[in-house]
């Protein structure tokens, strides 16, 4: 959400909150800065702004001040809008801003912008942090967007999945209950329709597109289900790990360095970093997300996998 749009929506919220009467579109146009001069352009933008406020959960009443009024008006009832005071410490506000920076680069960009708008409307300034050493990053999983939408809208999906140890992928039909992150990997858990059982799938092993296979609201999440616990149990089995030797640009890639077993200067602005990994497909995707700041020295199959992903992005 642009700064101009955020300021306009904030002004609109303040205007409709402060009025005890319904304000017509003409009155709103005159009172709220940021709308175009053309009335037709104003009407189109105002319609979009109304939908935006409703999507943010802001109650918008429509009505008239008297029975004789011909034009409807708008207002935000204070009793339906006001929440208890939000009190955040500076470090908590900074963490929220950091989270918003991560999601701004992913499918939740709109939700992140909406959350910051609500905080600012409540008087909490969650400004982006510029602290050194913090690299907000969300590894791009193509399956994340549609799966997150499916969980939100409670609709089943179908996708092709290559399980560990299997040479051929299989088609899966899933009623998704939640998408969670564990140790830097994304998982979806839910009810596998074909097997009539609870299953967990790693997003990096999903091949091709995730497709919706049913209407909104057709998935029921059992009461008391803890998706994080399901993923933790599924991911708790020990797996054999390999070691990767990486050339990492000095002063970058803190997410990789946290897992390193060895670091040493390599000269010319580079370091040699040894990092253990178990899932080559996921780790190649993770390394590729750091772009030109990482070069894989060993093993060769991991280097080839990273190059394949980078070439795909370039193409």
Image (cartoon, rainbow, N blue to C red):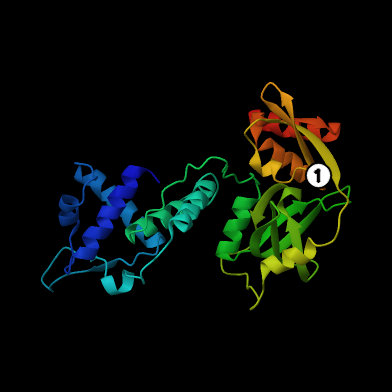
Question: Where in the figure is residue 156, as x and y percent of width and height?
Answer: 65, 63
The residue closer to the viewer here, 134 or 280, is 134
Query: Label 1: how many residues lie within 10 Å, few (<14), some (14-19) or many (20+)?
Result: some
The residue closer to the viewer here, 192 or 234, is 234
Q: Residue at x 42, y 62 (%)?
A: 88
Q: Residue at x 41, y 48 (%)?
A: 127
* 189 on left or right of 279: left
Q: Is residue 314 above or below residue 48?
A: above
Question: Where in the figure is residue 113, as x and y percent of width and height?
Answer: 43, 51
- Quadrant of image for the C terminus: top right
* 18 on left or right of 189: left
Q: Residue at x 28, y 52 (%)?
A: 46
Q: Residue at x 83, y 53 (%)?
A: 163
* 234 on left or right of 73: right
The residue closer to the viewer here, 117 or 156, is 117
Where residue 26 sits, quadrant-wise, is bottom left
Determine if residue 264 is in view.
Answer: yes
Q: Which residue is mark 1?
A: 276
The residue closer to the viewer here, 77 or 88, is 88
Question: Where in the figure is residue 193, as x and y percent of width and height?
Answer: 75, 67
Where residue 22 sits, quadrant-wise, is bottom left
Where residue 89 sits, quadrant-wise, is bottom left
């Amino acid at each position: 959400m642009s700064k101009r749009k955020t300021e306009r929506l904030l002004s609109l919220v303040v205007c409709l909150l402060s009025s005890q009467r319904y304000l017509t579109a003409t009155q709103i146009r005159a009172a709220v800065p940021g709308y175009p001069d053309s009335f037709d352009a104003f009407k189109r933008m105002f319609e979009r702004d109304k939908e935006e406020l409703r999507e943010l959960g802001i109650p918008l009443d429509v009505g008239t001040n008297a029975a004789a009024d011909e034009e409807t008006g708008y207002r935000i009832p204070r009793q339906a809008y006001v929440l208890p005071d939000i009190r955040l410490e500076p470090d908590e506000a900074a963490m929220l801003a950091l989270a918003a920076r991560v999601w701004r680069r992913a499918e939740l960009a709109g939700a992140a912008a909406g959350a910051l708008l609500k905080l600012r409307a409540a008087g909490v300034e969650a400004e982006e942090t510029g602290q050194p050493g913090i690299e907000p990053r969300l590894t791009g999983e193509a399956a994340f967007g549609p799966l997150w939408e499916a969980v939100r809208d409670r609709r089943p999906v179908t996708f092709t999945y290559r399980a560990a140890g299997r040479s051929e992928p299989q088609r899966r039909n899933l009623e998704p209950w939640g998408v969670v992150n564990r140790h830097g990997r994304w998982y979806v858990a839910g009810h596998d329709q074909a097997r009539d059982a609870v299953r967990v799938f790693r997003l990096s092993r999903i091949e091709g597109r995730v497709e919706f296979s049913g209407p909104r609201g057709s998935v029921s999440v059992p009461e008391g289900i803890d998706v994080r616990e399901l993923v933790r149990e599924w991911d708790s089995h020990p797996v054999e790990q390999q070691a990767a030797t990486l050339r990492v640009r000095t002063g970058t890639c803190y997410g990789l360095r946290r897992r390193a077993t060895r670091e040493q200067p390599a000269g010319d602005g580079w370091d040699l970093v040894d990092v253990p990994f178990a899932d080559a497909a996921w780790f190649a995707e993770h390394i590729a997300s750091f772009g030109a700041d990482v070069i894989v020295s060993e093993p060769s199959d991991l280097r080839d996998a990273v190059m394949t992903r980078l070439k795909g992005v370039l193409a």
